[in-house]
Image: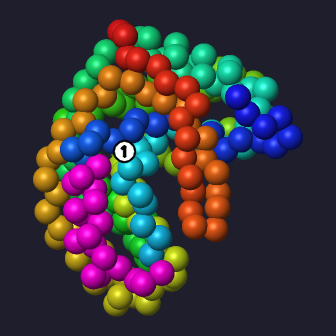
Amino acid sequence: MVDAERKLRLFVALSASEAAQAELRRVADAMRPFAPSDTRWVDADGAHLTLRFIGATPPESADAVGEAVARAAASAAPFELTLAGAGVFPERGAPRVLWVGVAGALDALGALQRGVADALNALDVPQEPQPAFRPHFTVGRVGVHLPRQEALELREAVAAIRVEPAALAVEEIGVYRSDLRPSGAVYSRIASSGLAG
């Protein structure tokens, strides 16, 4: 399944529905006039909402990761989200990430994220430190440090973009591999598990 000579960059995520992908493309197009020219835009076909970033993982641990995620999925029932609002990270200072948020069954989403985190924490697999969970789809990454006024203008322009509430039925979660290339990261799903709770 994987190259045993190197570690895998793994993460657990929800993939975007076709309706969400289409809306993410439209929002990215609306952001482009305001973003720096070196912004790296995420291909909407691979858009995902990360539940847990694992990071560099020995190939021999990939199956255990998949099994842990499957256990978490088995105890969660399907739920519905919609796209909602746009913004930037970090909340202060120069923007680095342009994103679209979600609304809907946020309690169910939070419970699923905690279940995945707990299942992975029980493994003897090194994991990178985790920031607080802020559910979102990354749309673009800003490659330069913007001066204060330009940062403020970008932040305000992005926040003013209307996001249509495209539906996202959460019925499964996946374990993804991220391969970093000069053109950007390429994602491939190596395991998926249906929500069965």
Q: Nearer the viewer, residue 123 or 69?
A: 69
| Residue ID at (82%, 43%) | 6
Q: Quadrant of residue 35?
A: bottom left
- Decide if residue 196 is on the left or right side of residue 62: left
- Is residue 15 depicted above or below 134 in this figure? above
Q: Is residue 182 above or below residue 109?
A: below
**Percent position of residue 29, x then y:** 26, 70
Along the viewing direction, whichever of 26 and 197 lies nearer the viewer: 26
Predominant secondary structure, magenta span: helix
Q: Residue furthest right?
A: 5
Q: Which residue is mark 1?
A: 135
Quadrant showing the C terminus: top left
Residue 66 can be seen, yes or no: yes
Disc 1 is placed on an element classified as loop
How many discs appear?
1
Residue 12 in picture, x, y percent from top left: 52, 35
Residue 82 is left or right of residue 150, and the answer is: left
Identified at 40% across, 36% down, the residue is 14
Tell me if mark 1 has few (under 14), some (14-19) or many (20+) residues whose alpha carbon lies within 10 angstroms of its own: some
Q: Residue 183 magenta-drawn?
A: no
Residue 63 is left or right of residue 170, and the answer is right
Q: Which of the two residues, 136 or 18, is positioned nearer the viewer here?
A: 18
User: Residue 129, can we see it?
Assistant: no
Q: How is the image coloured?
A: rainbow
Check disc 1 and give the amino acid type. Answer: Pro
Q: Which residues are magenta?
A: 21-38
**Quadrant of the image for the N terminus?**
top right
Q: Is residue 86 above or below residue 102?
A: below
The structure residue drawn at horizontal position 64% and vertical position 24%, both measured from the top left corner, is 65
